[in-house]
Amino acid sequence: MDSLVLLETNLHQLLNDYQQLQEQARMLKEENLRKQADLEQAYADLHLLRQDYKRLEAAHAMVANSQLNDAERIEAKKRLTSIISQIDRALEVLKQ
């Protein structure tokens, strides 16, 4: 009779372990979906930032040929630096 009780106890433990593993697998799948969505958003952001960068490069090339005062150059440089920082952050997100 003791072996039957032991078997029943082991079966209950096995069932509990199985349920816990199922829950863990469900949570990991959800986390995976969230990470995948984050990655897709990061790629979309990177694409937009690259487009902005190309536009700024073109604008910079045009502006380089024209006469700008110091304040306009400083503002253009700030905008360019900001876009480059955003691209760098997007690349870091993609690496993760």
Image: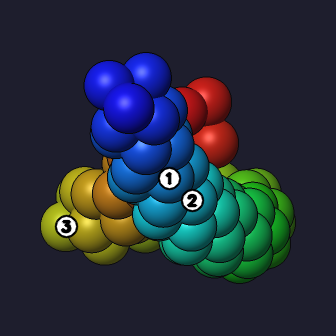
Q: Secondary structure at mark 1?
A: helix
Position of residue 6 measured from the top left corner of the image (x, y, whole percent): 36, 28
Residue at the limit of the structure toward the front, as seen here:
1
Q: Residue furthest top?
A: 3
- Crowd around label 2: few <14 · some 14–19 · many ≥20 (10 Å): few
Residue 52 in percent (x, y) is at 67, 73
Residue ID for mark 2: 22
- Label 1 vs label 3: CA separation? 71 Å
Distance of label 1 from label 2 (alpha carbons): 10 Å
Under circle 2, the secondary element is helix
Which mark is first along the chain, 2 or 1? 1
Q: Is residue 13 above or below residue 64?
A: above
Which x, y percent locates residue 20?
A: 41, 53
CB atoms of marks 1 and 2 within 8 Å: no
Considering only order in the chain, which callout, 2 or 3, is on the residue closer to the N terminus? Answer: 2
Could one spot residue 96 in this view of the protein? yes
Q: Residue at x 32, y 25 (%)?
A: 2
Residue at 57%, 59% in the rendered image = 22
